[in-house]
Image (cartoon, grey):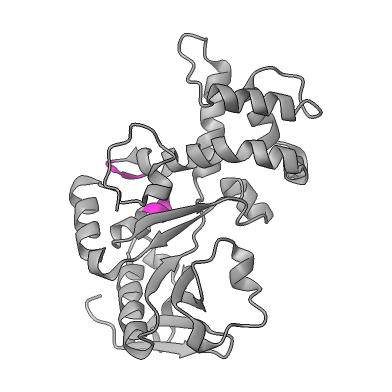
């Protein structure tokens, strides 16, 4: 597939754009959609995007937020059509709405909880000599103290695993538990996104998609998606990927050739002794 015959952007009254790529070979059926919300600032929660009521005036929007990218053709799995669509959306929005200065996403982290629970389970069955302690001393103490009504264990990682796998996500109903889980969950999420790799590239599929398109990791958002799916995938954490127009090609090339992940200091500060560029 070498060319795309039609690219259309439809701007609705609620300031949400629905963009698609269409080819002449599929009778006008879109191949891939990207949904864009025009906002004052980069959203921290999915509720800000979906429940933007009333919508902000168009003249006040400074951010184009990509929050959903989906393909209509299962056979196109593995083909990065989103790369071309994102670049075209940015070009068109910059031309038609020069007031928009920020291009970002609000993205899920689909592999985080699976990775974390695997780490916690491995630690549970490993002897003390080989066990990796995922928690800092102060994090472990705070977890054990806060979760006394949920678990009698004095091992912080056991408590953490128990809470994260509890029926109906009982931990989300306790403000105290939410507070003490935040530091280790955010720190380990940063480690997952920045350090955990497969064949030299980000282990997380969504992270890999945006990083190979030239984005950088901008911000982690705690309790950004409290739906069952959001809690199951990532403990409710979502991430903003930032597309800085002037750095897209450079970022994409360094990620492709070296597996280099660009991130803001807001994210990289969560991970100690991690060598990477701080933009």
- Total numbered circles: 0
Q: Quadrant of residue 211?
A: bottom left
Residue 127 location, x and y as percent? 52, 10
Classify residue 57 as left or right of residue 244. right
For the residue pair 236 and 202, the one nearer the viewer reads as: 236
The magenta stretch is 199-207
Residue 163 colored in magenta in the image: no
Establish if 194 lies above or below 104.
above
Establish if 242 lies above or below 140.
below
Classify residue 120 as left or right of residue 273. right
The extreme right residue here reads 149
Residue 203 colored in magenta in the image: yes
Q: Quadrant of residue 251?
A: bottom left
Residue at point 59%, 61% (across, down): 45
Using the rendered image of the protein, determine whether residue 71 is visible from the camera's viewpoint.
Answer: no
Residue 183 location, x and y as percent? 56, 38
Residue at point 41%, 52% (across, down): 205
Residue at point 27%, 37% (across, down): 275
Residue 261 location, x and y as percent? 30, 48
Q: Quadrant of the N terminus?
A: bottom left
Q: Quadrant of residue 276?
A: top left
Residue at point 74%, 44% (across, down): 175
Classify residue 257 as left or right of residue 170. left
For the residue pair 129 and 103, the one nearer the viewer reads as: 103
Residue 195 location, x and y as percent? 36, 38
Using the rendered image of the protein, determine whether residue 114 is visible from the camera's viewpoint.
Answer: yes
């Amino acid at each position: 597939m070498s060319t795309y015959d039609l690219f259309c952007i439809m701007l609705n009254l609620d300031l949400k754009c629905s963009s698609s790529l269409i080819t002449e070979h599929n009778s006008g059926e879109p191949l891939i959609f990207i949904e864009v919300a025009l906002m004052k600032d980069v959203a921290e929660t999915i509720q800000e995007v979906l429940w933007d009521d009333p919508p902000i005036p168009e003249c006040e929007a400074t951010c184009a937020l990509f929050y959903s990218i989906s393909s209509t053709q299962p056979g196109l799995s593995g083909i990065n059509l989103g790369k071309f669509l994102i670049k075209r959306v940015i070009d068109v929005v910059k031309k038609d709405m020069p007031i928009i200065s920020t291009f970002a996403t609000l993205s899920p982290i689909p592999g985080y909880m699976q990775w974390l629970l695997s780490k916690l389970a491995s630690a549970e069955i490993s002897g003390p000599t080989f066990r990796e302690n995922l928690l800092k001393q102060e994090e472990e103490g705070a977890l054990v103290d806060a979760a006394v009504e949920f678990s009698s264990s004095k091992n912080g990682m056991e408590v953490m695993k128990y809470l994260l796998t509890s029926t109906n996500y009982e931990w989300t109903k306790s403000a105290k538990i939410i507070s003490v889980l935040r530091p280790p969950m955010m720190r380990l999420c940063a480690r997952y996104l920045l350090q955990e790799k497969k064949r030299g590239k980000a282990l997380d599929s969504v992270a890999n998609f945006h990083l190979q398109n030239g984005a950088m990791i901008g911000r982690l958002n705690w309790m950004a998606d409290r739906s069952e799916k959001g809690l199951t995938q990532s403990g409710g954490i979502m991430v903003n990927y930032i597309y800085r127009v002037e750095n897209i090609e450079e970022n994409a090339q360094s990620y492709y050739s070296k597996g280099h992940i660009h991130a803001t200091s807001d994210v990289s500060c969560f991970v100690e002794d991690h060598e990477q560029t701080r933009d």
